[in-house]
Structure formats: structure tokens, C-alpha cells
Image (cartoon, helix red, strand yellow):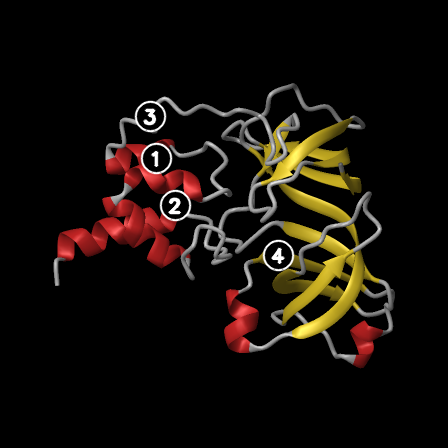
Amino acid sequence: MNTEVTTKTNEIAEQLPQLDCGACGYKTCGLFAEFVEHNPNELKRCIHLNGKTEKLQNMMACKSCATEKMAWKDNLQRDFDFILDCFENEPGPRETMLPYNPTLVKELGVKKGDIMIGRPMGMSCGCPITHCGVVTDVDARNGVINWCVTGPLKPRTEGFVDIGYYVAQGYEGIIKESKVPIQLGMRYWFLPRRCMLQWRHSGLVNAITKMKDGSLKIRIEGLFIG
């Protein structure tokens, strides 16, 4: 085994979103990492990087990608104001959701650590993608669930709880880069870092904490896609 090549592949894989969504044509992010190690110009196949490829570009010395800059456009070429990144050491975006049938939380025995699927409705135009994720907190009294939205690989391989349709009540995450100043009480267009469709969302910022590194920890509610 070529240890140098394996190490480089692992380093590339660590910078990929770990969604294993298959949109790039490969079953897992790990397999895609092996491919782009030898075909760096194909890095653009990963729609979730959204231009944030500097570390990978340096790693692969990809001259053709080096001039790539943030376009601040979603997959449908619509403007947005900032990217909502995941919290460190969490597997995906943190979302608060309320099932259309909250009694399912008790009936299905949903608990922290469960792998769950469901489709968000109630946001403008709705999201056509079934979301998959890991439950981080459950309020069984009113049916509210907090979870980290991830890719579909875990449900495919480890089984899942199907919560059905739900309303996305809020997102929490980190803003590391933005096109405009972020203010409390203002509504913005934003792009969740690991949104599989790469469509912009809109929401009202109702909590902001400035972190030591200059990033912003925020909570966004009143969501819709548009």
C-alpha cells in the first residue's frame, strides 16, 4: 500500500462534507476523495463546497481552481447573504423541528442518538428532499426534536425512525463568512453549508453570540425556501 497516497486521500476526505449524497457520482465522500486526488479539476462536482475550496486547492496544488472565489449564488443563481456552517464536531446542521403529528415522538419512542428521516413541509415551496439525521435532543411533552441533519448513508446502512412530514422551526450554526453585516432581528437569505440542493433559505436572526475567533453563533427562525 502506498502510505503517502492513502494519507493524502484521507486529508482530502476530511475536508469534504461527509454527506455521502452521491451527487458527485460516487457513493461516498471517501471514494470521491480518491478520485479528485488524481483529478483535481473535478472538485467542482461537489456542490456542497460552494467555492470554499482553498484548503483542498492548496492540498492538491490545483492551479485551475486556485482563482475560484465565493460567488454568493445558490444552485439556481439566486443571491444569498451568508453561509450557515455546522458547529465543530457535529455531523451536520443543527435543526429544530416539529412533526406534523407530534404524538409520533412518544409512539415511536424517539430518543437522543436515534437515526431519523423526515421531509420538511410548511416552508415556502417545501423541500423536495427527505432529510436524514441524528437526534440530539427530544422534548416529548410537545414533540419538538433537535437533530443534526446528515447525509443518507447512515439510514441506508443502520436503519432509521421515520418521523414523516415536519415543520422546520429553526436552525442554529456558525457564520464564518458573510456578504453583509449580520444584525439581530433582521431577515436574511442564507445557504446551509450542507444543503443537498444548494438552495437559498430565508430566516430571521433572533440570537447572536460573537465567538473569540470572530465568527458568529446564531439562531434563525421563521424559515422558508425561496
Q: Residues within 10 Å of mark 1 (few under 14, many from 20)?
A: few
**Which label was assigned to residue 148?**
4
- Which mark's residue is nearer the viewer, 3 or 1? 3
Residue wearing tag 2: 15
Q: CA distance from mark 2 to mark 1?
A: 8 Å
Which of the two discs, 3 and 1, labels the residue nearer the N terminus?
A: 1
Residue wearing tag 1: 55
Element type at marker 3?
loop
Q: CA distance from mark 4 to mark 3?
A: 31 Å
* Residue 96 image offset from top left, x and y in percent: 74, 54
* Residue 12 image offset from top left, x and y in percent: 32, 47
Q: Amino acid at mark 2?
A: Gln
Q: CA distance from mark 4 to mark 2?
A: 18 Å
Left or right: residue 203 compared with residue 72: right
Mark 1–mark 4 CB contact (< 8 Å): no
Left or right: residue 66 compared with residue 180: left
Q: Residues within 10 Å of mark 2 (few under 14, many from 20)?
A: some
